[in-house]
Image: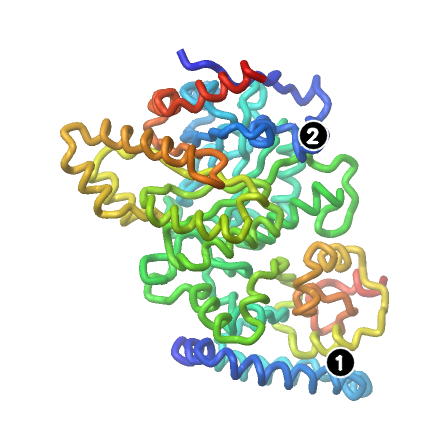
């Protein structure tokens, strides 16, 4: 919802603190997740994530959450889905070119980022293009897999994106993931994953 | 007669090997050469024809040839259909005109774009401008599907990867990487003003070798922007070309302000056109004065002239601004 999503931006600092703790917890649970199996967890966690983040941020479940680098303003709500800042069409007063009644997602993002401890630095990082095959999957589980990655060799394609956007990956590992994906967390056919 | 500043060979992809970058350069582009020599660079926008006749391209380019370092071939700007940037570039490269291929993220996905870039480089394109693109709703086909697979920054980084690492974004190797001079756009005169310089920094970091700004009509605002840019040292990281252009009348100015995304024209500018006996001449004069001011502004390395449907004036404007005379003098003394 628009009003709640703007509330989240105004309270970006609180969400940043919460997320840092939450991320540590999720990453810490990786051994447990592995024992249960990421594939078994994927659906229930994705449903929960969609509900929670959908309510708070109008989350679109891109599967590669970078909220902490975009001032808690979800870039997928930009009609052009820009992940790296506003376009050149922002209207007077900071309104969207395509949806004139909506505040520009990136004007909001900078507002949120300026309220955060680390936001102003992180918003300057160049984010990679979204991997559309991860749409609908859980970014929370992906972060856990990435941060606790066991060093399994990644595909050349994943490694190339991770190299080209190294700084983004460093802060937002889900933006350029390297770990192998459970079958139900990606729409890419299994050919790629068996490598 | 305007002294010619372009002396490239007409490029023929069948007869010539791909354009190579001289040492210390990223491309074989004339624009890059001019900028690295410290010349005040000139680029100009071409009005693309709604035609399949190559002669219409040459006719549109005629007033721009010989007065600029590169001609920008727009990519369906304002989301209106015209001949493609690629088509225009391949015709003009064979005429030996320096060109800037424009790529908007609105219409093509990463598969199409990376392939286009190889095609463009093979056709003799030395400069590529990476743009987000206006929303489809502003154009003549509002029912089109907006793509936006890349944004302008991830596009810049992807093309930089192709050029510098010699691979597609998928990691597959290129036999010959494209030697291209990469550009981005910036719009200093629209919100969020305080972050426009930061966005420019991000573009430079993503891979922009040069920046062409949108129309500048609000000099005080642009000056404030440039002060911020210089404080951040960005004018040393990327070549900044300021966008200027004449407008036919106050009515046109009002229409542009209301209907073209990202155009900021202050009331004072429109008032000046209104009061003038010949608004078109006044606008031309304002444009020349503005170039005069930009030439001496620290950090500005050139101008990008956008004279939509007034391309015939570009030569006069450049001539009157004295840039070419200055350059010829520099050349003679060198």
Look at the image and tell me in which quarter the N terminus of chain B lies. Answer: top left
The chain letter for the residue carrying disc 1 is A
For the rendered model, the colour scheme is rainbow
Asked whether residue B210 is in view, the answer is yes
Residue denoted by label 2:
B21
The chain letter for the residue carrying disc 2 is B
User: Quick one: A59 or B156, which is closer to the camera?
Assistant: B156
- Cβ atoms under marks 1 and 2 closer than 8 Å: no
User: Quick one: A114 or B67, which is closer to the camera?
Assistant: A114
Residue denoted by label 1:
A38
The residues tagged by marks 1 and 2 sit, at their Cα atoms, a distance apart of 49 Å
Q: Secondary structure at mark 1?
A: helix
User: Quick one: A46 or A153, which is closer to the camera?
Assistant: A153
Q: Are marks 1 and 2 on the same chain?
A: no
| Left or right for B112, reference B260 | right
- Residue that appears at 37% across and 35% down: B293
Q: Which mark lies nearer to you, 1 or 2?
A: 2
- Residue that appears at 80% across and 59% down: A155
- Dividing the picture into quadrants, the one containing residue A51 is bottom right
Q: Which mark is residue B64?
A: none
| Left or right for A32, reference B15 | right
- Residue that appears at 50% across and 59% down: A85
Rendering coords of residue B67 (x, y %)? 45, 21
Look at the image and tell me in which quarter the C terminus of chain B lies. Answer: top right
Other-residue count near label 1 (Cα within 10 Å), few / some / many at <14 / 14–19 / ≥20: many
Asked whether residue B134 is in view, the answer is no
Q: Is residue B90 above or below residue A70?
A: above
Q: Residue reaching furthest front?
A: B333
Q: Secondary structure at mark 2?
A: loop
Q: Is residue B157 above or below residue A149?
A: above
- Dividing the picture into quadrants, the one containing residue B178 is top right
């Amino acid at each position: 919802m628009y009003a709640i999503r703007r509330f989240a931006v105004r309270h970006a600092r609180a969400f940043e603190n919460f997320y840092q703790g939450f991320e540590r917890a999720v990453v810490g649970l990786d051994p447990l997740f592995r024992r249960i199996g990421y594939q078994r967890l994927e659906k229930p966690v994705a449903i929960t994530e969609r509900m929670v983040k959908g309510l708070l941020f109008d989350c679109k479940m891109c599967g590669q959450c970078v909220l902490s680098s975009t001032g808690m303003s979800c870039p997928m709500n930009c009609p052009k889905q820009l992940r790296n800042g506003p376009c050149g069409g922002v209207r007077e007063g900071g309104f969207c070119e395509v949806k004139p009644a909506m505040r520009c997602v990136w004007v909001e993002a900078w507002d949120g980022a300026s309220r955060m401890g680390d936001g102003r630095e992180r918003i300057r990082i160049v984010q990679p293009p979204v991997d559309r095959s991860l749409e609908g999957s859980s970014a929370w589980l992906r972060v856990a897999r990435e941060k606790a990655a066991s060093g399994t060799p990644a595909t050349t394609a994943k490694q190339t994106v991770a190299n080209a956007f190294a700084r983004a990956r460093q802060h937002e590992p889900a933006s350029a993931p390297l770990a192998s994906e459970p079958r139900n967390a990606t729409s890419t056919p299994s050919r790629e994953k068996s490598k | 007669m305007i002294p010619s500043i372009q002396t490239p060979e007409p490029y023929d992809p069948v007869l010539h090997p791909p354009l190579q970058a001289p040492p210390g350069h990223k491309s074989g582009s004339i624009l890059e050469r001019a900028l690295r020599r410290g010349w005040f660079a000139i680029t100009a926008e071409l009005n693309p024809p709604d035609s399949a006749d190559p002669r219409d391209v040459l006719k549109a380019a005629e007033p721009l040839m010989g007065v600029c370092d590169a001609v920008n071939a727009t990519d369906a700007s304002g989301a209106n259909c015209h001949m493609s940037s690629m088509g225009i570039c391949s015709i003009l490269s064979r005429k030996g005109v320096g060109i800037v291929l424009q790529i908007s993220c609105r219409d093509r996905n990463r598969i199409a774009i990376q392939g286009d870039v190889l095609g463009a480089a093979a056709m003799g394109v030395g400069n590529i401008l990476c743009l987000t693109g206006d929303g489809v709703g502003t154009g003549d086909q509002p029912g089109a599907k907006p793509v936006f697979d890349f944004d302008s920054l991830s596009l810049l980084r992807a093309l930089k990867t192709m050029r510098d690492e010699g691979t597609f974004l998928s990691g597959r190797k290129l036999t010959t990487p494209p030697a291209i001079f990469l550009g981005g756009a910036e719009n200093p005169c629209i919100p969020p003003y305080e972050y426009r310089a930061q966005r420019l920094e991000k573009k430079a970091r993503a891979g922009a070798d040069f920046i062409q700004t949108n129309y500048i009509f609000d000099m005080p605002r642009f000056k404030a922007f440039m002060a911020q840019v210089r404080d951040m040292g960005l004018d040393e990281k990327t070549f900044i070309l300021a966008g200027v252009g004449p407008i036919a009348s106050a009515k046109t100015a009002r229409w542009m302000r209301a209907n073209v995304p990202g155009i900021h024209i202050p009331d004072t500018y429109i008032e000046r056109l209104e009061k003038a006996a010949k608004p078109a001449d006044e606008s031309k004069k304002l444009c020349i004065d503005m170039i005069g001011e930009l030439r001496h502004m620290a950090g500005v390395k050139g101008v990008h002239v956008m004279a939509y449907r007034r391309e015939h004036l570009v030569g006069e404007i450049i001539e009157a601004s004295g840039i070419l005379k200055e350059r010829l003098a520099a050349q003679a003394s060198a």
